[in-house]
Image (cartoon, helix red, strand yellow):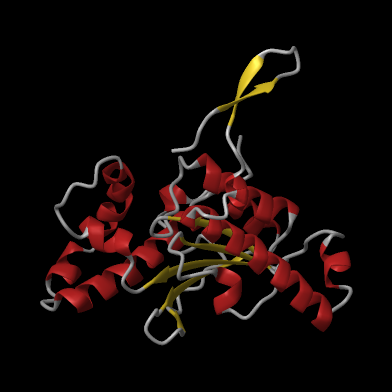
Amino acid sequence: MYATLAASGPAGDSVPYLPNLINQTNDPMAESIKDLIKGNQDWVENTKQKDPSFFDRLAQGQSPQFLWIGCSDSRVPATEITNRMPGSIFVQRNIANVVHHTDSNLLSVVYYAVKVLKVKHIIVCGHYGCGGVLAAMSNNSYGYLDNWLVNIKNVYRMHKKELDAIEDEHARGNRFVELNVQEQVNNLCMVSFIQEEWENGEFPYIHGWVYSLKDGLIKDLDITKHSPAHLASVYQYSSNQV
């Protein structure tokens, strides 16, 4: 698509050079990228006008009270839908807000949030109409994604009787979204270092929410946990080991 030009490398060798897409003003893709940069500049200017010292404070560090585990869906940005500024929410997102105990990416984020940032609340937030949840409800194959969707299909298996009894497919999908959030909250409660924090105090509180794309409102599922007491004993850890 773009001509490869020769440029001189550190040792004088010829190395491939790709023209900067941002400077390709006649290219639609380049224009969309330039719009992002321009949007950033406008945001900085507007923010400074409202709060001249905002970026000075932001550069000093972060001390968020919340960890948000949400869906990767571009329509569900944590800070925007809760009317919060940068620095207030630590964020981890993946398809269908899944908490899996072999996901080192997620566990690293949770560990840092709990052990270093000392967040007081962890929010698992799903959203109605979640494509990942709806895909897991079907028998269609989505290639590599099928391996991830197994985590959500397991939730359906656990609640199959309730979900199969819901005749309306839309209502069944909405309930599946809620149950998925519920089980991801439970999965968080099984994490060993979260239970370790609970032994040393009451935090973090773990909440389950669902966001509605239709009206922009968040529904609290009222399943907040701050101890492993609701879990089967096999999932409960104790630091008092022989």
Q: Which image quarter holds the C terminus?
A: top right
Residue 142 vs residue 217, the one in the foreground: 142
Residue 51: x %, y % from top left: 84, 79
Residue 234 vs residue 61, the one in the foreground: 61
- Figure check: 132 above or below 55: above
Q: Which image quarter holds the N terminus?
A: top left
The answer to whether 203 appears left or right of 214 in the picture is: right
- Figure check: 137 above or below 166: above
- Figure check: 103 above or below 120: above
The answer to whether 83 appears left or right of 209 in the picture is: right
Residue 138: x %, y % from top left: 17, 58
Question: Going 39% across and 66% down the picture, which residue do you hit?
Answer: 182
Question: Going 57% across and 46% down the picture, which residue do you hit?
Answer: 21
Picture quadrant of residue 33 = bottom right
- Figure check: 148 above or below 31: above
Question: Going 81% across and 64% down the picture, which residue do you hit?
Answer: 58
Residue 150 vs residue 12, the one in the foreground: 12
Specify whether residue 213 is in view: yes
Question: Going 62% across and 81% down the picture, which residue do you hit?
Answer: 83
The answer to whether 207 appears left or right of 20 in the picture is: left
Picture quadrant of residue 105 = top right
Residue 36: x %, y % from top left: 60, 62
Picture quadrant of residue 173 = bottom left
Specify whether residue 203 is in view: no
* Figure label count: 0
Residue 89: x %, y % from top left: 65, 67
Residue 26 vs residue 146, the one in the foreground: 26
